[in-house]
């Protein structure tokens, strides 16, 4: 790609973001989310006669951009969670993560095998695990809507923050098995636990120490407010990159670092997260633009099978495991339905699709990307359109 074309691509992305900023309020009233708008812009400006961005799905840097974006989003969302409230209500996220998530991955695997019998069980497992984790950023309209009870918003936020990291070792495991044709017994079961443990411990240490240093710097007049904001964002990057470098789970590290940072700083550095949320928002828009530019065009080859899988992934494959995991929690059907429905698939699934494209055979990788992309596109549209009306109706009958 030539230098001038690079500038044209950057200009196209910047123009799309500026236009969204100008019209965002009006578009959101029409239930058009930022992700929907940027995906559409990427598709329009990178394909056909209007195309100015020519980057293939395997281009260097796209996967890394998506990974760092997800890490910063997770850190920022976690930093806003009250650890004290979370400790009092840890059972609900635990149910969704320890019962609901494995059941969702298993159901997704079976659904993929039934709909795509030509794919191996391992490739189907990759797909099932890739579309299981939910997206905190894509679910922001419901998580930030104060009409929805705080407890439900917190549960959804924590679930989406941690399930990306928990799903990562499963995706990697299934990718290895799909390529090598290995068995469960021949793959180390301690590897995934080690990744999660390193991620949790490393993230907690980085978030707590970094937050304490920034608080002390503010107290003793060593650091300015502006650079404190930059420092908070840098902690998110440090947690992800540092922990991945030593073999840990970067997504778990980023989320736990955010929790630790928020616990240490409490309200003393609340404004420091403004920059982090801004950076996360901008990077997310860029990723959605690129997703529309390089992955959505693959759907030209879509068949009824991909559409059916996406429909099941967003409904029964998610709703049934959530309902089973919440048995005995004391929720009515409407609450279980809201928690089950608002499991949007977004950045994590995009990252896992890129992993599948890089690691699987070309044929299997193409199948996996097409199936995951169809699911993400359906989620972007359906969850984006339904967030505001569902929040309003549910909040009116379930004040909290």
Image: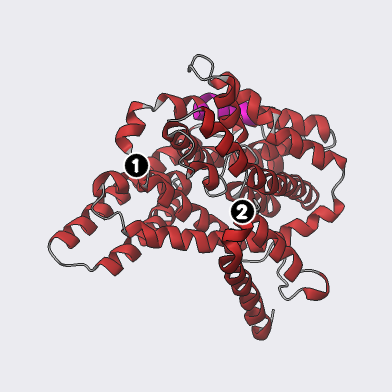
Which residue sits at x=69%, y=78%? 1
| Residue occupied by mark 2 | 29
The stretch drawn in magenta includes residue 321 = no
104 versus 230 height, above or below: above
* Residue interval drawn in magenta: 96-104
295 versus 22 height, above or below: above
227 versus 154 height, above or below: below
Q: Is residue 218 left or right of residue 360?
A: left
Of the pair 293 and 60, the residue shown nearer to us: 293
Tag nearer the camera, 1 or 2 = 2
Count of numbered circles on the image? 2
Residue that sits furthest to the left in the current view? 220
The stretch drawn in magenta includes residue 97 = yes
Q: Residue 276: x and y, percent? A: 40, 59
Q: Is residue 75 left or right of residue 18?
A: left
Q: Secondary structure at mark 2?
A: helix
Whether residue 181 is visible here, answered yes or no, is no
| Residue occupied by mark 1 | 201
Q: Quadrant of residue 48?
A: bottom right
Residue that sits furthest to the top in the current view? 328
Considering only order in the chain, which callout, 2 or 1, is on the residue closer to the N terminus?
A: 2
Which residue sits at x=33%, y=63%? 229
Kindly report the secondary structure that dominates the magenta region of the rendered protein. Answer: helix
User: Which image quadrant: the C terminus?
Assistant: top left
Q: Residue 199: x and y, percent? A: 41, 44
């Amino acid at each position: 790609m030539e230098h001038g074309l690079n500038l044209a691509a950057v200009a196209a992305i910047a123009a799309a973001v500026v236009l969204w900023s100008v019209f965002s309020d009006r578009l959101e009233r029409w239930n058009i989310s930022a992700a929907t708008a940027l995906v559409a812009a990427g598709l329009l400006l990178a394909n056909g006669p209007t195309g100015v961005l020519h980057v293939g799905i395997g281009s260097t840097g796209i996967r890394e951009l998506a990974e760092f974006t997800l890490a910063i989003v997770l850190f920022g969302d976690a930093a806003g969670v009250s650890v004290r409230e979370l400790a009092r209500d840890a059972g609900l996220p635990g149910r969704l993560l320890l019962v609901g998530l494995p059941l969702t991955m298993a159901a997704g695997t079976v659904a993929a095998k039934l709909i795509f019998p030509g794919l191996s069980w391992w490739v189907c497992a990759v797909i099932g695990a890739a579309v299981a984790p939910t997206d905190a950023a894509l679910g922001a309209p419901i998580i930030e809507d104060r009409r929805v009870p705080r407890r439900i918003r917190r549960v959804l936020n924590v679930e989406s923050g941690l399930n990306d990291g928990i799903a990562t070792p499963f995706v990697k495991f299934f990718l290895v098995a799909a390529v090598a044709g290995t068995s469960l017994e021949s793959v180390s079961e301690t590897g995934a636990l080690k990744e999660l443990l390193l991620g949790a411990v490393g993230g907690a240490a980085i978030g707590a120490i970094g937050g304490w240093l920034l608080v002390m710097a503010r107290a003793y007049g060593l650091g300015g407010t502006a650079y404190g904001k930059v420092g908070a964002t840098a902690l998110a990057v440090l947690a992800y990159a540092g922990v991945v470098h030593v073999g840990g789970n970067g997504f778990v590290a980023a989320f736990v670092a955010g929790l630790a940072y928020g616990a240490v700083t409490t309200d003393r550095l609340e404004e420091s997260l403004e920059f982090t949320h801004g950076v996360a928002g901008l990077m997310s828009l860029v990723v959605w633009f690129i997703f529309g530019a390089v992955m959505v065009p693959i759907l030209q080859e879509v068949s009824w099978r991909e559409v059916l899988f996406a429909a099941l992934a967003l409904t029964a494959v998610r709703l049934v495991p959530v309902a089973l995991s919440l048995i005995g929690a004391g929720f009515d059907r409407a609450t279980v339905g809201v928690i089950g429905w608002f499991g949007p698939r977004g950045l994590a699934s995009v990252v896992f699709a890129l992993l599948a494209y890089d690691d699987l055979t070309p044929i299997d990788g193409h199948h996996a990307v097409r199936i995951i992309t169809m699911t993400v596109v359906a989620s972007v549209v359906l969850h984006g359109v339904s967030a505001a009306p569902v929040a309003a109706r549910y909040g009116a009958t379930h004040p909290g």
